[in-house]
């Protein structure tokens, strides 16, 4: 098991972002080095942190991004206007073309509320390289429940989930990091109802689990889990990995597994059943090391794949092939 995450070579990190993601005046290392004024240099560094990283070396075999949000804004209104304008021009086709150029041949576009779940259906109709997942995010569920609107939202989700290229209910689950204790019962109610929807439609279940491992597992066992359960952005330790292995639940690793302080995640990855491992970006979040904090996209997933292959001491081509088989087991074919 590797103890640290591999980083691209200095030559790699000096490259610019792929063209669709590149700003009009990208901040290069050379430009940073040439700037002598401390205030101006600090401003350049802040701007560079908002720019997309360079593309990694392509993978030797194709894989799929198990969880992404192509509709989420990458930058907020405080970011420079030219950067926001440049990213607004990155189309679905652009994003998927760049990802394909490094071996990420498709993705699962994931909804978090009704608006983004409607977008999921539009997106999977627009590009055959996408499959979809629809749900109400656990952090949004309590407000809907309190307003008496949760059941109506779930009814619309069921209609959206009938599209043949929607293959999962998610992301649903529990998030005790952002939800106060008094609202957690409503979150649990929503999770149970999403779980039943996944079973009724025979779809995979993508779980958002933050600081709630024990209750997530309890509810899965009490309610009876769907046939295909995915712990999106797996955040557990070796103990949870063993539970997943026992029950045949999938662990989807994001860029967090590459972080220097994520030894526990790499330990979990090392002992996971190889047939239950998936990889995702959760873009535009969780950019892998050494670009942590900068925007993420599906084209950056090869770095996470490489770290996992090294962690498991598995030859990269063979690991990619295993990932592809696992992904198809969960979601079916993209064809």
Image: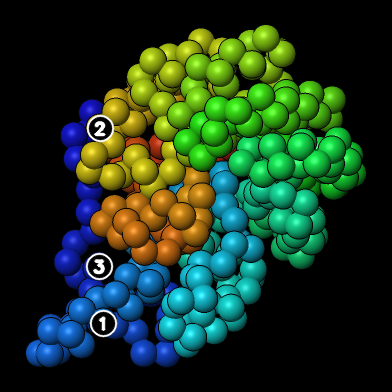
Where does residue 332 sit, x and y in percent of width and height? 70, 37
Closest to the camera, between mark 3 and mark 1, is: 1
Mark 3 lies on residue: 12
Residue 263: mark: 2
Dot 1 surroundings within 10 Å: few (below 14), some, or many (20 or more)? some
Rendered view: 20 above or below 168: below
The picture quadrant where one finds residue 71 is bottom right
Foreground residue among 251 and 156: 156
Mark 1 lies on residue: 44
Tell me how far mark 3 sits from mark 2, CA to CA: 25 Å
Where does residue 335 sit, x and y in percent of width and height? 73, 49
For marks 1 and 2 on the same chain, the one whose residue lies earlier in the sequence: 1
The residue depicted at 49 percent of the width and 59 percent of the height is 284
Left or right? Give the position of 282 relative to 292: right
**Would you say the residues marked 3 and 2 are in contact, meaning their CB atoms lie under 8 Å apart?**
no
**Secondary element type, mark 3:** helix
Tell me how far mark 1 sits from mark 2, CA to CA: 32 Å
**Would you say the residues marked 1 and 2 are in contact, meaning their CB atoms lie under 8 Å apart?**
no
Dot 3 surroundings within 10 Å: few (below 14), some, or many (20 or more)? some
The residue depicted at 77 percent of the width and 27 percent of the height is 193
Foreground residue among 305 and 208: 208
Is residue 206 in sight in this rendering?
Answer: no
Closest to the camera, between mark 3 and mark 2, is: 2
**Secondary element type, mark 2:** helix
The picture quadrant where one finds residue 215 is top right
Rendered view: 320 above or below 24: above
């Amino acid at each position: 098991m590797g103890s640290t995450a591999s980083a691209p070579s200095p030559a790699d990190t000096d490259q610019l972002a792929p063209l669709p993601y590149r700003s009009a005046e990208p901040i290069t290392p050379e430009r940073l080095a040439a700037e002598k004024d401390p205030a101006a240099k600090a401003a350049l560094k802040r701007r560079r942190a908002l720019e997309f990283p360079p593309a990694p070396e392509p993978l030797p075999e194709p894989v799929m991004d198990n969880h992404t949000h192509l509709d989420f804004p990458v930058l907020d209104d405080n970011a420079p206007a030219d950067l926001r304008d440049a990213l607004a021009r990155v189309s679905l086709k652009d994003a998927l073309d760049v990802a394909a150029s490094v071996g990420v041949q498709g993705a699962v576009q994931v909804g978090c509320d009704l608006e983004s779940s409607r977008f999921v259906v539009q997106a999977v109709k627009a590009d055959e390289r996408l499959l979809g997942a629809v749900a109400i995010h656990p952090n949004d569920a309590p407000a809907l429940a309190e307003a008496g609107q949760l059941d109506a939202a779930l009814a619309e989700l069921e209609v959206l989930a009938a599209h043949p290229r929607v293959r999962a209910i998610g992301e649903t689950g529990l998030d005790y990091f952002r939800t106060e204790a008094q609202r957690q019962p409503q979150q649990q109610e929503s999770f149970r109802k999403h779980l039943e929807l996944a079973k009724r439609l025979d779809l995979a279940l993508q779980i958002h689990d933050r600081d709630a491992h024990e209750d997530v597992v309890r509810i899965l066992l009490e309610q009876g889990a769907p046939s295909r359960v995915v712990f999106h952005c797996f955040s557990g330790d070796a103990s949870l990995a063993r539970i997943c292995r026992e029950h045949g639940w999938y662990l989807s690793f994001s860029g967090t597994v590459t972080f220097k302080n994520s030894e526990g995640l790499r330990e979990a990855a090392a002992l996971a059943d190889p047939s239950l491992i998936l990889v995702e970006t959760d873009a535009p979040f969780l950019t892998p090391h050494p670009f942590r904090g900068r925007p993420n996209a599906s084209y950056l997933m090869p770095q996470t794949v490489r770290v996992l292959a090294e962690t498991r001491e598995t030859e990269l081509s063979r690991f990619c092939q295993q990932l592809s088989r696992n992904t198809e087991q969960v979601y079916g074919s993209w064809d």
